[in-house]
Image (cartoon, coloured by chain):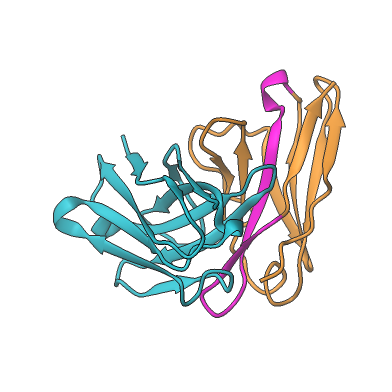
Amino acid sequence: QSALTQPRSVSGSPGQSVTISCTGTSSDVGGFNYVSWYQHHPGRAPKLMIYEVTKRPSGVPDRFSGSKSGNTASLTISGLQADDEADYYCYSYADSFTWVFGGGTKLTVL
Amino acid sequence: EVHLVESGGDLVQPGGSLRLSCTASGVSVSSYYMSWVRQAPGKGLEWVSVIYIGDNTYNADSVRGRFTTSRDNSKNTVYLQMNSLRVEDTAMYYCAGDPDSSSCFSSWGQGTLVTVSA
């Protein structure tokens, strides 16, 4: 399983919006609606932010949204806040009962 | 509230074995899709294995044939048996799961550190 492709880093100022992309293939991201996104602050357990491409777990602010087009999924964070600064990972089903993470994106809030 | 606690991480020599445990509270592991996810130092998250509610297990290519996931419902614990360990298996190992799907992780443990070194 090859890791899904994410930008190494993105940045934005408080209040702005940023979008993190997650590119795979038709065998993973493009083939199934099983993409989820995780926020990971160093030293803490990762946190589920989006599941099944667009669904938001209870307790996750609606500033976080997910989408997918073809083989690329995206996580958009609007109204950036300082606490959003973290690493973000996408995760997808990759066929034959295997799963794959993206390489991770470091979000910096300027 | 769901609480997952990993244990068993240690320093082990290449070629050695180790068994990690993930004990749950607030939930029955028998009703959860449970996975192991690892993060090597300075690297990203990597899916390692999953055990389905029906006890079928699946592994990443990188560990297939060396790692085995199992579950003991009486102890409410999931295990990761790791054999033929390699230096590149050095990582923080997390257990994570969800009651409804194997496609996402709504609950995570804090991790246990495995170091493979001579």
Apparent side of residue A109 relative to residue B2 in the rendered image (left or right): right
Which residue corresponds to the image point at 72% horizontal and 21% vertical from the top-left? A81
- Chain A as rendered: colour: orange
Residue A24: quadrant of the picture: bottom right
> Residue B61: x, y in percent?
58, 74
What stretch of residues is rendered in magenta? A81-102
> Residue B93: x, y in percent?
48, 48
Pick the front one: A46 or A53: A46
Residue A89 lies in magenta, yes or no? yes
Pick the front one: A72 or B38: B38
| Outermost front residue | B118
Apparent side of residue B13 relative to residue B43 in the rendered image (left or right): left
Which residue corresponds to the image point at 42% horizontal and 50% vertical from the top-left? B95
> Residue A68: x, y in percent?
74, 59
- Chain B as rendered: colour: cyan
> Residue A67: x, y in percent?
72, 53
Residue B4: quadrant of the picture: top left
For the N terminus of chain A, the image quarter is: bottom right
